[in-house]
Amino acid sequence: MKTCRSLTIALIVVPLVVLSLSSCDTETREGAGFAISLTESGERILADEHIAAYVWDEHRILLSPRGVERWESFVEFDKSQDPPIRKMGGLTTKEFVVTLNGVQMYRGHFSSMVSSLANSGVLLYDTLGVPPGEVWMTFTRLDGALEDDPRALPDIAAYFRKQGKLRESR
């Protein structure tokens, strides 16, 4: 009788423990790694699987083929031209947050090299004027602001170094 009851308890408890552990693992993976997400919705724009390399001294992200596909899914095209040409829009002027393992590192906003808006802080440029397969992040100070460049966080460099994705410009 005791053996039957122990077996029944084990058959109930073991699957519950396995389910519990697997759901924790899923939550960890979703917040893990490096990500650039929209502030308003939390949608991840780019994450580890989209990044082939991070060029540290220029803060350029070199995209993997999957990353190029993801990044270009946010590009708007003028289809009245043949072939269609890229136009400003998509992510331009939206705010983003950079996270590392679920912790906010800094915020910024998307911009365009053809935009006449002058903005301060971290800017992530859209595809106009940027070589294909790259994403550029700049930091600008307007009005004499003395804030430090938030992109230069050692934790981010260490993370990409550990991933084997940290590069220096040539």
Image: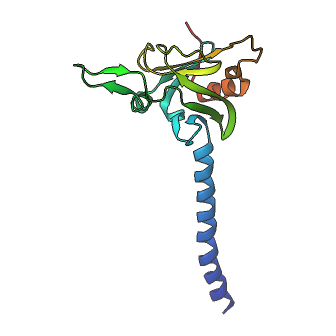
Residue found at the far top of this picture: 170
| Quarter residue 124 falls in | top right
Looking at the image, residue 22 lies above or below residue 79: below
Is 119 drawn above or below residue 96 in the view shown? above
User: Is residue 134 shown left or right of residue 158?
Assistant: left
Name the residue at 63% across, 63% down: 20
Residue 19 vs residue 156, the one in the foreground:
156
Residue 103 in percent (x, y) is at 69, 38
Q: Position of residue 31 (x, y in %)?
A: 62, 44
Asked where in the image residue 57 lies, by quadrant, the reply is top right
Q: Residue 82: x and y, percent?
A: 22, 19
Left or right: residue 106 compared with residue 131: right
Q: Residue furthest left?
A: 82
Q: Residue at x 46, y 13 (%)?
A: 114
Quarter in which the N terminus is drawn: bottom right
The quadrant of the image that shows the C terminus is: top right
Q: Where on the picture, by quarter, is residue 12?
A: bottom right
- Identify the residue at image location x=59%, y=32%: 96
Q: How is the image coloured?
A: rainbow
